[in-house]
Image (tube, grey):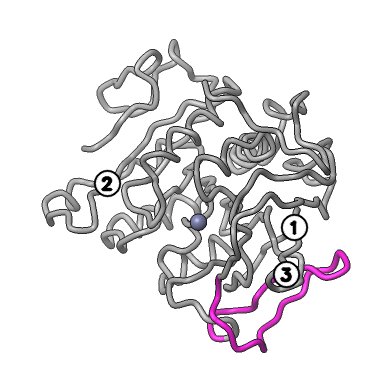
Amino acid sequence: MKYRFASTASAIALAGSLFCDAAQGADLIKVLLLDGQNNHNWKATTPVLVEALKSSKQFEVVVSTSPPNNGSKEDWDQWRPAFSKADVVLSNYNGKDWPQEVQKSFIDYVKSGGGLVIVHAADNSFGKWKEYNQMIGVGGWGGRKVGRDGPWVHVVDGKVVRDSESKVNGGAHGPRNPFLVEHIDTKHPITKGLPEKWLHQKDELYCRLCGPAENMEVQGTAPSPMTKRNEPMLMTIAYGDGRVFHTPMGHDVEAMRCRGFFTIIQRGTEWAATGEVKRTAKVPSDFPTADKISVVPAP
Ligand SMILES: [Zn+2]
């Protein structure tokens, strides 16, 4: 099995368990991070996601790396992420369809109450996988079309609009720039207590994401220069008994090394795992303001 531990210092693989035992961290939230394929540099961004989580000292992270796109059948037959051992799965994966057995265990995991976090191009993946699209609410590219695959969800004057009429492909973005994130739901555990407007570090601002958008709520948006609408940046979705947190932010290392991004990844992951935000609720003193970005220094 191709499992890598995020930190050699604290990671000890015990027989039968990919996560550590009680002495090592029974009190930590167990995160299974998926990568291995992406049209983005996942080898560079996975360590930043791991850092964002582990720097809070509230998470234990195990990375499960899929075979490459041209991986052998044998490799794919061996790749069976242990979803049921995790409190929450974080996907940094955008690639080839998973084996049926993996798809089924993933659906069972989320449906029965597992947490899921979707970051950036993970919402490009699996355009034709019905259950995945229900989990992520909306997605882009991957053959997605507004209307046929569900509404383009955006926000106008603080109200969520579901546009099924526009004849456009799902998913677009302009050049990378810093942009203002605005929380339209300030009572949700993920946003509660944070500044309501903050400037996000230079990133792609995804727009025209579309999908089933069932049981989905939008907590935060950013104004798209392309669509002139407020596009969802923080979303939560209920799927079965599972909780999903989805952010289309996080194109690359530069975009991720934003204190705002670190904070919402911590809070979103805790919320997806537990339904509340307690351990990661403290607002960092260097949280970005409405007119000033805040870059997390390299470790
Ligand atoms: Zn991107």
Indicate which disc, 1 or 2, sits on the residue closer to the N terminus.
Answer: 2
Q: Residues within 10 Å of mark 2 (few under 14, many from 20)?
A: some
Determine whether, in the image, residue 222 is placed left or right of residue 195.
Answer: left
* Outermost right residue: 157
- The amino acid type, in three-letter code, at marker 1 is Thr
Q: Residues within 10 Å of mark 3 (few under 14, many from 20)?
A: many
Residue at image position (65%, 75%) is 152
Identify whether 158 is placed above or below 29: below
Say whether residue 53 is magenta.
Answer: no
Indicate which disc, 2 or 3, sits on the residue closer to the N terminus.
Answer: 2
Indicate which disc, 3 or 1, sits on the residue closer to the N terminus.
Answer: 3
The residue under label 1 is: 221
| Distance Cα–Cα, label 1 vs label 2 | 35 Å
Q: Circle 3 — which element?
A: strand
| Magenta extent | 148-171
Say which quadrant the N terminus sits in. top left
Residue at image position (50%, 46%) is 252
The residue under label 3 is: 154
Percent x, y for residue 131?
47, 67
Question: In this view of the protein, can residue 246 be seen by the observer?
Answer: no
The residue under label 2 is: 80
Percent x, y for residue 185?
82, 52
In terms of depth relative to the viewer, which is nearer, 123 or 60?
123
Residue at image position (30%, 59%) is 98
- The amino acid type, in three-letter code, at marker 2 is Arg
Single out the mark in the foreground, 1 or 2: 1
Q: Circle 1 — which element?
A: strand
Tags 3 and 1 touching, CB below 8 Å: yes
Determine whether, in the image, residue 211 is placed left or right of residue 121.
Answer: right
